[in-house]
Amino acid sequence: MNSDRFDRQQKTTRLHLAMESEDVLSRIRELPGRCGSMEYFETRLLDFSRGELPPTSNKRLGTMCVQVPEELLHAMGASSIRLCDGSYAFDQVGAEFMPAKSCPLTRATLGKLHINQDFWADKLDAIVVPTTCDQKRKMAESLTAMGYPVITLEIPATRDTELAVAYWQESVKRFALQVQDITGVKLTRKKLKEAIALNGESSRLFRQLQKFQQAEKPQLYGVDMFLVMSCYFIDEQASWQKAVRALLAECEGRPVDKQVGRAKSPRIVFTGSPAIFPNLKTPLLIEESGGLIVGDECCSSSRILYDAVAYDEDQLYDMVPAVADRYMKPCTCPCFTPNDNRTRKINELLDTCKAEGLIYQSLSGCLPYELEQRPVSEAVSESAGPMLFVETDYSPEDVGQLSTRVEAFLESIQNRRRKTT
Ligand code: SF4
Ligand code: SF4
């Protein structure tokens, strides 16, 4: 592509991204009864879409998956930023050089790093790509071809064998050495303990937020939880924690009879391919149509901070394996096989949240999630409520059809409720 055309495409993409981000936020702001403290997260995400990153003097590593052990990066003096992208503007750029059947998340992420290469090349010291699904694996090659330094984090395809556990432990140790080479900071017991404590605090705050989302009268919308967690991708942890504390204080101070959404809104658990700002299409349609997402099982939201590192002795030989365990043992990503844990977790979530239905999103081209929809639907039909499976992408074209299906599903939950009461 000649440089004039590239410059024009860059300007148009930036404009479209800004419009897309503003548009989704203005729709979210229309939802009644939201907490005012959500403004911090909205502003951070908008700033990010305009190219503003939190200032840091640390080395900065981009990550491509929730399975990258953050504590190790932070303990060795690196800032991390999750690069998985939800923008249709970037998806369109990526579509120019990615196969039509690739998932929009991969296309958008590569599109962003391609069209804004002048910006990111300067800001990233390396990008960590996990060997999870085929598309992530191949993404490492595309990024290398673009000139980015890439660290491949090798993840086994199963979690349950001794061999897989040993492989993952070795992989994490190797990863730690690679990060150490980049930052020049040695991993010590003290620094790792501090990093684990910092993430542990984020995890504690997140679980408190979850209580307000899951409450009988929820104080937080599901889309707000997605905003909070999309912000966690890009923010410095200390600033994020401060904003979450303010949000918690607001939730705590609200009158007990107040809630978001409507009284008796159908209570939904959301699962499937990650919903990442600004692509909150399905979650937003659910809540605009009168449903409430009271819980989710997504690696772009509740799976990020649900689990904390647990170790017995504060020695490196105990803490590093504990960090590795925290990222693999509880992970319910469908890239693992077998993955019975996921159906168990979803059923637990439906139960804890007193949910009345499950909405399962698969992004077009995302085979791991599409393949698991059948076992999940079979496991769920035996317990709580019905399940709606939707396949979608980042384009606005299917909004009308998706909205009709979501509304009909919510209506069926209300009919069911009427029959049983
Ligand atoms: S779906 Fe799985 S592989 Fe993809 S980002 Fe989430 S946890 Fe990682
Ligand atoms: S797990 Fe699905 S959404 Fe994530 S990168 Fe792979 S194909 Fe895309």
Image (tube, helix red, strand yellow):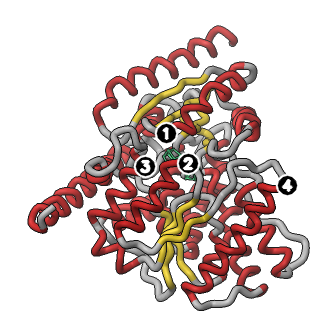
Q: Pointer 1: what residue? A: 366
Up the image or down, 109 lies above or below 280; here it is below
Within 8 Å: ligand 2 and the Cβ of disc 1?
yes
- The x and y percentages for residue 141 are 44, 61
- At 62% from the left edge and 32% from the top edge, which residue is drawn? 372
* The N terminus, quarter of image: bottom left
Mark 3 vs mark 4, foreground winner is 4
Q: Which mark is residue 162?
A: 4
Q: Earlier in the sequence, mark 3 or mark 2?
A: 3
Within 8 Å: ligand 2 and the Cβ of disc 2?
yes
Q: Pointer 3: what residue? A: 105
Asked whether the residues under the numbered discs 2 and 1 touch, taking CB atoms below 8 Å apart as contact, a structural biologist would say yes
Q: CA distance from mark 3 to mark 2?
A: 12 Å
Q: CA distance from mark 2 to mark 1?
A: 9 Å
Q: Is residue 327 visible?
A: yes
Image side of residue 312 versus residue 120, left or right: right
Q: How would you rate the neighbour count of disc 2 (Cα within 10 Å): few for under 14, some for 14-19, many for 20 or more?
A: some
Asked whether the residues under the numbered discs 1 and 3 touch, taking CB atoms below 8 Å apart as contact, a structural biologist would say yes
Q: Is residue 239 visible?
A: no
Hey, what amino acid is under mark 4? Glu
- At 54% from the left edge and 70% from the top edge, which residue is drawn? 151
Q: Earlier in the sequence, mark 2 or mark 1?
A: 2
Q: How would you rate the neighbour count of disc 3 (Cα within 10 Å): few for under 14, some for 14-19, many for 20 or more?
A: many
Q: Secondary structure at mark 1?
A: loop
Q: Pointer 2: what residue? A: 133
Q: CA distance from mark 1 to mark 3?
A: 9 Å
Q: Earlier in the sequence, mark 1 or mark 4?
A: 4
Up the image or down, 241 lies above or below 278; here it is below
